[in-house]
Amino acid sequence: MATFIHVFAEAARRSIQRRGIKAGQYAKKRGTGVYASPVTQDYYFTHQWCREIKRQQNVPKLVARFRIPDDEEVYIGRYGVQHIRVAASAAIRIAREHVAPAGLEVIIPRSIKPKEILKIYKPAKALGWRYYPEAKGKKPCGCAYCQKGEPYSAAKKKAA
């Protein structure tokens, strides 16, 4: 069985425990599915989306760890790039062997049932990248378009 995690708002905990993880729209309404990250030996890459999602929606986050059958088809790829269709076990292998796994995401094209959820927990801290995977050590763009609605955007615009 292939194991994945899904990051969600703490307020949805009871609903997810009772009803599972509902499939939502993704990729400009091309389909429905559940965003997930493959569980690997590297805690950082497994939980990389926690910080980016916290930046977008500044509410406490929890993680649901769940299992799906190895042969179930999923989509894997970098955020914002075309995904490929593979078996769930192949998606985990791709994530483990990938040269630069930061930014990889998996889309499971169905809802996750409550019985498939193994554990719901609070991650140690918000790990991962902000803005984009290769952003570490680079200053964010200060243009008005990139800073629209961002916290502290006035200071960033002046610095640019």
Image: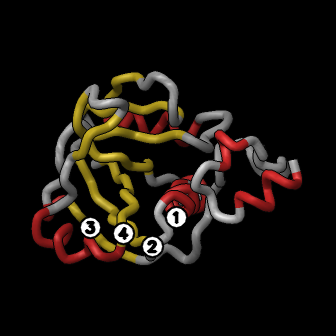
The image position of residue 105, as x and y in percent, is 46, 41
Q: Is residue 59 left or right of residue 52?
A: left
Give the camera-side residue of 146 and 24: 146
* Residue carrying label 2: 59
* Residue carrying label 1: 54
- The label shown at residue 9 is 4
- The label shown at residue 18 is none
Q: CA distance from mark 2 to mark 1?
A: 7 Å
* Above or below, comparing residue 10 to residue 42 in the picture: below
Disc 4 and disc 2 in contact, CB within 8 angstroms:
yes
Q: Amino acid at mark 3?
A: Leu
* Above or below, comparing residue 113 to residue 84 in the picture: below
Q: CA distance from mark 4 to mark 2?
A: 6 Å
* Residue carrying label 3: 118
Q: Amino acid at mark 1?
A: Lys
The secondary element bearing badge 3 is classed as strand
* Above or below, comparing residue 16 to residue 80 in the picture: below
The image position of residue 15, as x and y in percent, is 17, 70
Q: Is residue 120 left or right of residue 94?
A: left
The secondary element bearing badge 1 is classed as helix
Instruction: State which quadrant residue 109 falls in.
Output: top left
Whether residue 41 is visible to the viewer of this picture, yes or no, is no
Q: State the residue at coordinates (61%, 64%).
A: 127
